[in-house]
Amino acid sequence: MAREFNAQEGESPAVRGERSPFSRPLDRRAFLQCAVASGAAFGLCELAQFPVAIPAWAGPQKQDDSRFTVEAKFYEKLPNNKKIKCKLCPRECAVGDRERGYCGVRENRGGTYYTLVHSRVCAAHIDPIEKKPLFHYLPGTLAFSLATAGCNVNCKFCQNWDISQVRPEQVPADYAPPKLVAELAKQRDCPTIAYTYSEPVIFSEYLMDAADAGHEVGVRSVAVSNGYMQEEALKTAYGKMDAVKIDLKAFTESYYKDVVVGELKPVLDSLVILRKMNKWTEIVYLVVPTLNDSEAEFRGLARWIKTNLGVDVPIHFTQFHPQYLLKNLPITPVPTLERAKAIADAEGLHYAYIGNVPGHPAQNTYCPKCRRMLVERVGFTASQMLIRKGSCPFCGQPIPGIWHA
Amino acid sequence: MSSLCGANRRDFLKKCLTGAAVLGVSGRMGLLSAAEEGAALAKSRVVIAHDAMLRGAGTTVDSRRMLGLLDRAMQALFDRDNPIEPWRKLVRPGETVGLKVNALGGRGLSSNLQLVEAISERLQEAGIKASDIVVWDRDTDEMEHVGFHVSTGGNRVQCFGTDQVDYEPELAMYGSVGSRLSKILTQRCNVLINVPVLKDHDGAGVTMALKNMYGVIHNPNKYHPNGCNPYIADLNMLPEIRAKMRLTICDATTACFEGGPGYKPEYSWKHNALMVSQDPVALDYTGWQIIERKRAEKGLKTLEGDKRAPNYIATAADAQHRLGTNDPRRIAVVEV
């Protein structure tokens, strides 16, 4: 069944019900089919993306669990009752024998902790990198984007809850070992593999192996993540990434507790660590009406970024659409997003963007010195790219980012 | 003369408003369970039936003795002399009955097969067709692993997991819970009989009636923080569960006082008992006390002392949930 088109920027897989990129090469006919489908979707909404999708699921089906089961990397065995403590995310689930962690994709089997989602891809698409969104990373290029089931938080607004809030056996999946992913990305002219849609924290082992396989053939990797992760896991797993986008869901602990079922502080810590690792990082802040849209919050956030990460870290204020458990709130008004951007600008951040509002001028990149437009974007397409050798061609101002492959 | 005939407009409106207020408090008058109705009038009854010779001289439960044990429990609960009468009070011919077992604990600590057979036998004698009985849990493989024989057609008792039919695509929501429900619950059964196991649980403290509903939803892993509180109570408030739940028959033939929910022989004991009740909160409270007594006997800390007291039981009984009572003064424990 085709998934309902979702206009929200970020990590929504586009269309289900088509053949998997893992099941066949993309020949000329298939390419044209994709292009036609893409064009048709574009006619409906400029936010459409290149559809490459997983197979239609006729109903429940058994998957060979053993293919996807690999011992987890980040955990410790506890002394009693074959329990383990997961060390992947700050939740530190203490998991009894035969039970799973909060993420639903890691299981204790007799005192050994396993990931059940290595190479178990439930969503795969070729997306513009701008859809992640990463605006200062290889603009105009494509990302071979994939996800497994599961997530280590439970955001009430999740647009992909049907894959993020399920156990892996509940969704159809393809077996996509790292080398296959790397080869397919290269074949399809994707300079990047993006780990996205659900939450790459919970498939760190797979992400690391796929990143290694990609780097061997010259394909980079980016993670689209909530950043809710322990330091060692972050350094080990995201150390292999070429760029990271972090969803900073709010700037209050209460929001993280009530709406995300997580914590703010570890995410802020992750951002600082990524900064120290010199990892290219962009931040998305989904503005949810009445819940995280106060002026004080925007200002506090902007000041924190300036102080702890610097003024050159891009921040994307994106528009909320009612989803999942938050269907009672309206779409974020554009003036609210403009207010957030204005506050960030006033606090001195150089690259504050507005997302999910097609055609808005704040989707473009401007030189912070001469104010000339450097990258023009229409939807997820970079229609003009003027940055040369990492600098503004008009005034020579360095523009931070990874601009060229 | 009708009682309304003499009422003036003001009296009539008063009555209407009172009725509306009552509805507002309960919000679901049409769905009141037997436990709720009973709670307002009398104590919740929890029957514990023992049989020291349940296994004879061996280790396997004897089918005939199990049937006898079940009969004693049910007759005591419903105050009936005939073993079929309680079931006729519970179900009607034409209804489809789901037996929600628990196969998570693996061999040794899952819902007893002889118990499930005994329940199925009595249900059929009460007029339920074999094919209208569905023995189910979340996963078919787990059920087979503990000895259930999968059956998905013909005139036999049906037996399979939710993985065979999937979950509803839409979310059912109450309080902290937003979950997809098993289609076995929503589409195959109009009566639910809960058949959990008396167990310690490393997160929730204990697991019996209320927590067994975690096997009904697609995302139980999301509801383990904070000792599963208030998630367990909220989940049991879903109308699809509450309206169909008629009885809990808790398997306490082999029970577990530590290290649950998985089977660990060193922390299990042959209790050779069944616990039955129409009040799941009262049953859970009573089972909790049994586990605490066993823990004390073994020199273990209380669950409170182990920082995992099953606080969800009190939540299930609170004014917002009213799923039953956890007040020992309002629970009649009947041992037979």
Image: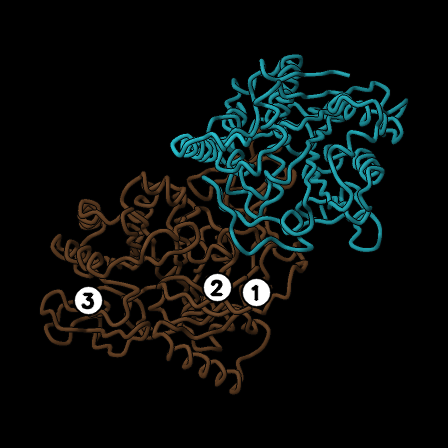
Q: Where is residue A297 in the image (x, y as percent from the top left)?
A: 21, 46
The colour applied to the residues of chain A in this rendering is: brown
> Residue placed at 59% from the left, 73% from the top?
A23
Amino acid type shown at disc 3: Ile
Task: Please state, as top left, top right, bottom left or bottom right, where the N terminus of chain A lies in the image.
Answer: bottom right
Q: Is residue B118 left or right of residue B77?
A: right
Q: Are marks 2 and 1 on the same chain?
A: yes
SS class, disc 1: loop
Q: Name the residue under label 3.
A: A399
Q: Is residue B117 left or right of residue A50?
A: right
Chain letter for mark 3: A
Q: How far apart are marks 2 and 3 (CA)?
A: 29 Å
Which mark sits nearer the N-terminus, 2 or 1?
A: 2
Q: Mark 1 points at which residue?
A: A176
Please say if the residues under marks 2 and 1 sit with CB atoms less than 8 Å apart: yes
Q: How far apart are marks 2 and 1 (CA)?
A: 10 Å
Which mark sits nearer the N-terminus, 1 or 3?
A: 1
Amino acid type shown at disc 2: Leu
> Residue placed at 47% from the left, 37% from the top?
A92
Q: Name the residue under label 2.
A: A146
Q: Do labels 1 and 3 share a chain?
A: yes
Front-most of residues A391 and A342: A342
Please say if the residues under marks 1 and 3 sit with CB atoms less than 8 Å apart: no
The colour applied to the residues of chain B in this rendering is: cyan
Q: Relative to B69, does residue A65 appear above or below in the rendering?
A: below
> Residue placed at 49% from the left, 66% from the top?
A3
Chain letter for mark 2: A
Q: Relative to B20, does residue A259 appear above or below in the rendering?
A: below
